[in-house]
Amino acid sequence: MAVHILGIRHHGPGSARNVKAFLENVKPDIVLVEGPPEADAMLQWVGNEGLKPPVALLCYQPDAPQHSVFYPFADFSPEWQAILYARTHQIHVRFMDLPAGNQMLIEKHPTLPPEVSAEEPATISREAIAVEEIRRNPISYLADAAGFTDSENWWEHTFEYRLNNDEVFDAVTEAMQALRESLPQKNERLEQLREAYMRRTIRQAEKEMFHTIAVICGAWHVPALKAKVSQKEDNELLKGLPKTKTECTWIPWTFNRLSFYSGYGAGINSPGWYNHVWHHPNDDGTLWMAGVAQLFRKQQMDTSVAHIIEAVRLAGSLAALRGLPKAGLEELNEATLTVLCNGESFLLKLVHDELIVGHQIGEVPTDIPKPPLQLDIEKHQKKLRLPATADFKDYTLDLRKDTDLERSIFLHRLRLLGINWGKPQYTSGKGTFKEQWRLQWDPGFSVDIVERGNLGNTVAEAAGNSVLNTGRAATDLKTVSRLLEQAIPAELPDAIDELIDRLNNLAAASADVMELMEVIPNLITVARYGNVRKTDAAMVQGIIGSMVTRICISLPSACVAIDEDAANLLLELFYRLNDGLNLLQQTELTTQWQQVLHILVNNKNTSPVISGYSTRLLHDSKQLLSDELVQHFSYAMSSTAAPATAAAWLEGFLRGSGTLLLLDQNLWQLIDSWVSNLSEDAFMQVLPLLRRTFANFSAPERRKLGEKARSGGASQQQAMAEVGFDADRAKMGLPVIMELLRIKL
């Protein structure tokens, strides 16, 4: 009976190649792999043509799916190659790590004695299981001894790039043994329990009379598994461990989530590069550089064959100078930077994202056991031709087309479930029939889907229940209106009807005019969506009408005796409400709004900034004639008004645009006269307000106003007269200009 313990690095192409060669030579009758025993039933899918790495085992607690752990695999993962060998040769294969159901509780309560159980499991990550921090730091000592400044670089050149694997596992075992004996050990209970469980699994295989046992585990664990520890000691250590029920399934994974940059503790720097090394172990850099050149050509960058040849030669020379057997990624990157990028380092970011890390995503068979909600999502993805990709992809949807409308509904429903696979983007134009989406799949969505499964078996059912649960718990108008705005494009009729009823009840009971004003713009958006979404928005428009009436009744008293901060907040609500009502284009509501603006303008106790802005809105809607406007302006800017009050009124009146001052000479002269008559102290008092007012104008407006002030505020006709402009003579040139421009009257 022989037990072969192979120490590997997770996701290493050299380690995977060595494991595969060793198994083919030794031909074991059972393979034990570091992983959760609960997932043994899922191993039957390895070798299925529909299961294509990168993929991951997802172990989760059924009654609390957010408590979960991932076990990722790629083609170049040694564990994957070991499992694939066992499945291909029809021999036994098992996972041998401490069950995930134990690890979830132990990770949450690492100091609990074995006989104490936890009430609630914790969400843990694969990095906690890999104990990467323990393994990574000790290896740096070996790298230092070999003259490498980077432990990752040393490991790659020593194990991942080498083609001769003679006694490589013996060398790994010897190195790890020396490190564990020489360095102080961290007394981590989880690691001790994991290694005790692995030893127990090996003993169980021996009891079952397997003659040749192959054990695949992280290199750091090899000395512990070879140590002479009694069965009694391991049993005592594992006795009474807390455990929770878990379920497992396969999910697609991505190269990006295999990288360190995603936060995965057992990750690697360069999944795309490792994938290249796995499939092309004898490449001297030529194939890699050809891929880089192809990438640059897609970006409209000139890259010739001569560039590739020169870069490969340079990478080889760098490797020789450094005493390396072949060029690695570091040498190839330096050659790329020098030859193909002309020293521009920012171009290497493109190579890093597209090739070194990559956007590859795995596939999972459709008939694999999955939650019903996951199956419904995949059915919609296939039907609507929206593939889940690791790289982002943009879609412009025309809601007048049936397929695009269905896509939009599906994406909006997912967002209501908190699955933000699609993110809305800005689209030009004022219409509501077009949407821009950016889609990028994250494997972490699989946990979200499992977690939302208790809301319903279909996307529509789950989204509707999610909206109803949130709406019933909401106690303020703002939350309900925002929820209604999100539910309308998702086309959830039952939820929408209930939200509208709740919104109507809350609006009837609300006496807060500012809350009502905050809600109106969102409801107007909902009402406009009704036409495009084929939803009856008449009920929403009725609520808008009743709320506008309440606002018009309560607003005059709300604008009296308020401080500057409250006035500015109200001013923003005025701006949004006025724009919304103009967009809605309902004569009755517009008339009510203009009537309340007249009340605010004529009430001397109204906050000056609001009174000024109300005057401006009435002027823009042609409700104030020129003489009336000058009258209001003269009263507000008169010498009897306090300078600060007049400045605040002017700030409100000029909010948004100063073009009116350029066009109306009478208003300009009124302001000029008011400023000229201010005392020095009063001028210094109002100067910050005036600067704030004019700072909000566009740059062209400020320039034109400055030119007008420089000329003394003269009108255009006066300015032309001052410079001796002859209008009659200028008219004589018009026929010639018209002929040159080929304009016929």
Image: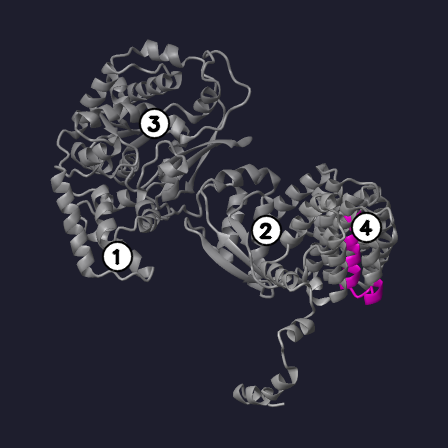
SS assignment at label 1? helix
Q: CA distance from mark 3 to mark 4?
A: 59 Å
Instruction: Look at mark 3 in the image and give the residue it sits on.
Output: 132
**Disc 4 or 1, which lies upstream in sequence?**
1
Instruction: Look at mark 4 in the image and give the residue it sits on.
Output: 547
Q: CA distance from mark 1 to mark 3?
A: 35 Å
Q: CA distance from mark 4 to mark 2?
A: 27 Å
| Of residues 610 and 734, the one drawn nearer to the viewer in this rendering | 734
Q: Main secondary structure of the magenta part?
A: helix
Residue 625 lies in the magenta stretch: yes
SS assignment at label 3? helix
Q: Say whether residue 553 is left or right of residue 422.
A: right
Marks 3, 2: nearer the viewer? 3
Q: Say whether residue 543 is left or right of residue 17.
A: right
**Disc 1 or 3, which lies upstream in sequence?**
3
Instruction: Look at mark 2 in the image and give the residue it sits on.
Output: 412
Note whether 294 is above or below 741 in the view shown. Answer: above
Q: Amino acid at mark 4?
A: Met
Q: Amino acid at mark 3?
A: Glu
